Image (cartoon, coloured by chain):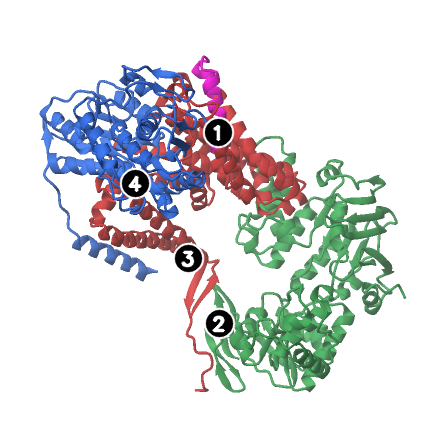
Amino acid sequence: MVNISKSFGEIKANDNITFSVNYGEIYALLGENGAGKSTLVNMLSGVYTPDSGEIYVHDKKLRFSSPGDSIGSGIGMIHQHFKLIEIMTAAENIIIGQKRSFIIHRKKLKKTINSISEKYGFKTDPDKYIYDMSVGEKQSVEILKVLYRGADILILDEPTAVLTPQETEKLFTILKKMKEQGCAVIIITHKLHEVMEISDRVTVLRRGEVAGTVNTSETNPKELTAMMVGKAVDLSIDRPAILKDEVMLEVKDLSLIDRDGIKKLNRVSFNVKAGEILGIAGVAGSGQKELCESIQGLERRKRGEILFRGEDIARLTPRAIFERGLRISFIPEDRLGMGLVPTMNIVDNVIMKDYYLQKSLFLDREPARERAEHIVKMLNVHTPGIYHPVNQLSGGNIQKVLLGREIDANPDFLVTAYPTRGLDIGSSHLIYDELNRQKMKGVGVIYVGEDLNVLLSLCDRIMVLFEGRVIGTVDASTATKEDIGFMMLGGKEC
Amino acid sequence: MLRMSARTDCSRNEAVIIRTSAILLALSAVAVFIMLLGHNPLSVYLSMIEGAFGSGYRITETIRKAIPLIVASLGISLAFRLKFWNIGAEGQIMMGAFGATFFALNFQNLPSVILLPLMGLASIICGGIWGAIPAYFRAKFRTNETIFTLMMNYIALKWLTYLQYGPWKDPGALGFPKIPGFTENAVLPAFFGLHIGWIIAVLLIVIMHIFVNHTKRGYEINVVGESENTGRYAGMNVKFIIIYTIFLSGGLCGLAGMIEASGVNKTLSVEITRGVGYTAIITSWLSSLRAPVIAIVCILFAAMIQGGTFIQMAFQIPQSAAQILQGMILFFVLGSEFFIKYKISIINDNKAEANQ
Amino acid sequence: MKKLTLFSVLVLSALIAFSGCGKKDKTTIDGKEVVMGFIYVGPIGDGGWTYAHEQGRKAVEKETGIRTIFKETVPEGAEVKDVIRSMIDQGATIIAATSFGYMDYVAEIAKEFPAIKFLHCSGYKMGENLSTYFGRIEQPRYLSGIVAGMKTKTNKIGYVAAFEIPEVVRGINAFTLGVRSVNPKAEVHVRWTHTWYDPAKEKEAAKALLDEKCDVIAQHQDTAGPQQAAEERGMFSVGYNSDMAKMAPKAYMTAPVWNWGPYYVGEVKKVLAGTWKASDYWGGMKDDIVQLAPITANAPDGAEAKVNDIKKKILDGTFDVFAGPIKDQKGTVKVPAGSALADKDQLSCDWFVEGVVGKTKGK
């Protein structure tokens, strides 16, 4: 890619970017969120068209106007969100969208797929249905799909975001095989250790520009971080000690069956102390969301007890809990779909949880305005103003508004689900610091997370969920990533 | 090759230019059509405007047509704010008119001051219930409100047909199926040459604006409309909010029905709505659900209908042609909304060029 | 975008430059132009009721030279008031409202505008400035009944009718009397549509009657829908309003038709002469306002001779369609021999004569 530029309206997503990838190498694109990584590869895969600049593949100048053109040139893109049809088998998904013929030669197809699998070390059954597959298997199907179409340049957008450590390990083995077979692999990520582990060369993007390209063997995480952020950053996360030994929240035998009759939580029991951060780990959909929503009073179909300072709140609505003077703040996973109203401004979002305490029929926004200004100042939210709709802010600033509102309510207890997902390193650390500050104030915290490194360094204890059950709880200061990864897949505590 | 992409950066100026071009394009396309009919487009357009605003009488007529449209649009906008696709305004208007007529026919001896408020209240309750039924099912069982409200329209229509041909048929009409006319005390009085429905409409616009933007209830509707999950998260009783908001929405449509029955028709008939319930869907969309804008859009819409009637007679243009004309203008204006939301760019379709 | 705007402006201005504009001479009375407005319940191309009135409007323009305006497809609801008001706003001084259902609204508006002259067709409410006008369509209807009665083999004749109002009931009675005058065994089966103008619904009703073994279809509707139903089934039909031979060449036999021109022209001439007064006009075949359309080859042999015989008597006043004895459906004598049904009773007629199968009330 030579001198690629792309703008969205006023924003320059990519500015004069040039890089090259060789066959037989794994190449990493590293950058914080919003650095322009996705835009860049979307141009390679034909989703966007560059405003200026040229793309050469095999020394041929190409111009892609659709994803089809790009696949035709041997570029295969694996998106972060899989584009598979659940009710079809792996083989059917692989050939879908292929023009060649109407009749499917099943046997021939299976043979081809198996030979590709063998070549790169996949263990995928072509006849398995997608809905029966784990996230890792689905990803394999996605990769097979582009390989089947003859791609020899592979682009993976944040491939490990949804994988367990074990699955990540498997994926990396496959990628290395591909490299050996002469494919070019481009991997987009913001996780430093992955870059260090797998890539040969790395280009760091910052605010749409190339911050530098280095050989992986000649660099270290610290240097890369400095390139990403633009200045040296302290990467360590503090873990202050728990102040007092007082159980704040106790959950006993909590079970929950959802609308469709599926058991989401199965006799979950645990407790959280005042001033403790309890981490919750597990593959996506293990019951984390349901657990958080149960504590906050959103889920009503539950059984069991939730004792908050000895008082059972399991049957109460969020408002009833609030009215008893119990302040449980909740930062939901779905920020814009649950935590905030995207089209409303910061003031209207700040007022959301306590507006109803106002006596008058009319809504007085004055106190909320002051609080909004306070939050913007306290958390350094980048916004044109407090009357700016939150969906026009960047992901990190959205999260700051949400966190700010929830912390500003002076909570006794804080439930957070993936609070740093999609946030850059700087913003993430700001949030870890804030959580620790709450901890020091004696607030009990539940931290649902996916990055095991963070869980291990931030939390006091880590509870692992699998299919709605508690597999085990480990002390974060002694546990290892591998232990937790094993438990996340349903394995018992070692 | 053409490519379509969502735009987020449409400035106010651009939007104005796009909308103006849409109207100009509509006018030129329609002009061709008018010429084919053998008329001078400019004089047709001028007389359309003249027909809608040319004299005190015509302005009154335009506003008379705008009143039910405004009241029903306000009602619909409330439902749309909740993302509850209320297509049932037509039926709610009919049921509102039914409720009002019930009192008008059965309590003919009451004085106006008592009878009219009673009729108004009855229309709000009837229209409201007609809206609240699908809302209840949506809140409780997540039924599709679009289909539900639409079907409710047909039930309302058949109910009025039954009344008109059956129990409420005017015995004095020698067998002609019509419902008896209202007595004088059941007719909305006039104020400044127009029935007082216009005052109701003005009041409702102000009240609606305040309600939506400056009350706690209005705030809840905005939150739940954006996302029911957020509403639940914030501790709101989402089901209750849905049901009473749609009750209000249907109630306003019902009130529009009462205004039409009492102020204009002075009776009830199956023709009572004149399609207002459907037109109001368009007007509330075009107004982006904002109450003050609704007033303007509805008056322009009424002007288009009024002007259309006028040119039909002045130029002897057939009814169907006049409707095509209105349809074309609408088509272009609605079409321009697409260009405000999306950008079309032309891409050269050369896939692989040889190097240099 | 700017290019588009510019383009539209250019197109608009070009169109305006190239199109001309002409105005006709005006006919005035006391310095005020006389303009006549016609309000139609259906479109002028319905080939029936509205079409017949439209011919009348054209006759007015041609013979008196005044300007006329019209509006089609005006529903029989409050909207007609808006239409009348905007016609007056556009200068109309005479207004002809051509459907029964407009009556109450026309009566209401007539009080509001005493200087405007109103003509309401087929109603019964009159005023200082509100005339009613209609024709004795029963006379040609009776004649068409003769044709139908001679034609039917199954002795069942279908009759598609709009509303249960005296105008329609009276027509069915006259038709049935005509049928039974030549074929005492024949029955007339009535089906209500509750619409004046709805081609599909009218056709459906006719088909239902054909399914019941009717072999001749008559109608009191505004479109040729029932005619086409008969044509499709290879059966025969009697039209209404205007000559429908073209719409159903193999089925159509004849039709009682309207000829509004003479009435409208006469009224306008009176207005221009300053002698107009509200009146209650009810003309018959001898006034030429109603006629029987030419009988086609589909009609049975001898029908034409029989029809001409009775027609002559109607024209010279020696035959009254509603002359006794007339029995109702139950066999009760309603009109004894030697007398005839008075106009007053005809106008409020709500019972069927013997030989009609159907009800005058409800569905």
For the residue labelled by badge 4, is the local secondary structure a helix, a strand or a loop?
loop
3D distance between C-alphas at marks 4 and 2: 54 Å
Residue C252 found in image quarter: top left
Q: Is residue B176 left or right of residue C144?
A: right
**Which mark is in front, 4 or 3?**
4
- Colour in which the image shows chain A: green
**Of the residues shown, which amino acid type is indicated by label 3?**
Phe
Residue B162's tag is: 1
> Helix, strand, or loop for circle 2?
loop
- Residues indicated by labels 4 and 3 sit on the same polypeptide chain: no
Q: Which chain is red?
A: B
Residue beneath the point at 43% across and 78% down: B350
Q: Are marks 3 and 2 in contact (CB under 8 Å)?
A: no
Residue denoted by label 2: A49
Q: Which residue is more in the foreground, B102 or C239?
A: C239
Q: Which chain does the numbered disc 3 sit on?
A: B
Magenta region:
B92-117
Amino acid found under the numbered disc labelled 4 = Pro
Residue B100 magenta-highlighted = yes
Q: Callout 4: residue from which chain?
A: C
Q: Which numbered tag is attached to residue B339?
A: 3
Which mark is first along the chain, 1 or 3? 1
Q: Secondary structure at mark 3?
A: helix
Discs 4 and 2 carry the same chain letter: no
